[in-house]
Amino acid sequence: MGPVQSLGATLLLLQLQSSLFLSLSWGATPVLASLLGNSLQNYTFSHTMFCQDEQPLVGLSEVFDGDLLFSFDFSRNTRVPRLPEFGAWASDEGDVKIIEDDKALCQDLQKGLSETFEGRIPEARGNPVAEVFTLEPLEFGKPNTLICFVSNIFPPQITVTWQYKEVPVESSSPTFLSAIDGLGFQAFSYLNFTPTASDIFSCTVAREGELFSTIAFWVPQNPIPSELLENILCGIAFGLGILGIIVGAALIIYFQKPCGSGAD
């Protein structure tokens, strides 16, 4: 396509972002109030909705100081916490009707703008950048979680898949998309696993209609000793200690023996 393209990937963002002083009207945001208590520090909370004409058609993310708290599942009209720790607050449905109204408004505006600016606005694209790391320090034989972090996403139309030694893995979590400053997006995908020394995992980021994908690999590096190894090393050290005590005692007894009597 030429530099001026059809508005096929039109994206509309409705974003409410403000600096909140926690001493002011937290009754309307009980979730954040319970998270932060009575601190008087300055924080930023972003509630961002987007809609477009490709999947996902609509999305909502809620970000606190740059960290994604919740996305929204429009098929079930419920919040989805990025981490299990946020699950206790995800069931708050007090603003679901407002979210539904915002969704309708976003899609109406997106449709109208697409018709108005068809062929007049170049399509912006960002090449995703991915990296993979573990949630906890690496320890062989101990359950852990791999995180695929994808940045430089625009528009938010990606598919994230996992492979183990080039074989697809089906047990990964949903992909969590969130808006960031500068009209960009980032995404997280999680995979629970039990690491071994021979692991080779990869995270593939693809977009429909594009011929290339972004792939990030993960192999074990700098593992901390496992409990089994620690126990073995402790056992060896203990055994060597006991052996040293026995040898030392034997030498003391040997050197304390009376010398043989001389000739009469």
Image (cartoon, rainbow, N blue to C red):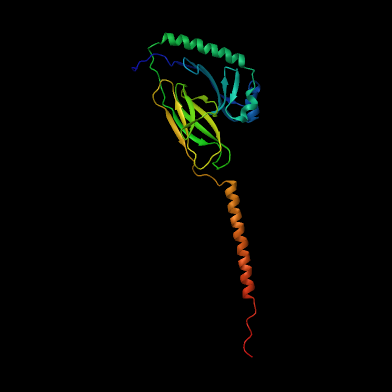
Quarter residue 249 falls in? bottom right
Specify whether 170 is left or right of 34.
left
In percent of width and height, residue 38 lies at: 65, 30
User: Between 25 and 253, which is closer to the camera in this rendering?
Assistant: 253
In percent of width and height, residue 147 lies at: 52, 33
In percent of width and height, residue 39 lies at: 63, 31
Residue visible at 51% across and 13% down?
106
Specify whether 244 is left or right of 3.
right
Q: Is residue 47 visible in the rendered structure shown here?
A: no
In this view, 162 is above or below 208: below
The number of callouts visible is: 0
Quarter residue 128 falls in? top left
Residue visible at 49% across and 28% down?
161
Q: Residue furthest front?
A: 167
Q: Residue furthest left?
A: 2
Residue visible at 61% across and 58% down?
239
Q: Is residue 97 visible in the rendered structure shown here?
A: yes
In percent of width and height, residue 72 lies at: 57, 21
Residue visible at 58% across and 13% down?
100
Q: Residue furthest bottom?
A: 264
In this view, 132 is above or below 89: below
Quarter of the image for the C terminus: give it: bottom right
Quarter of the image for the N terminus: give it: top left
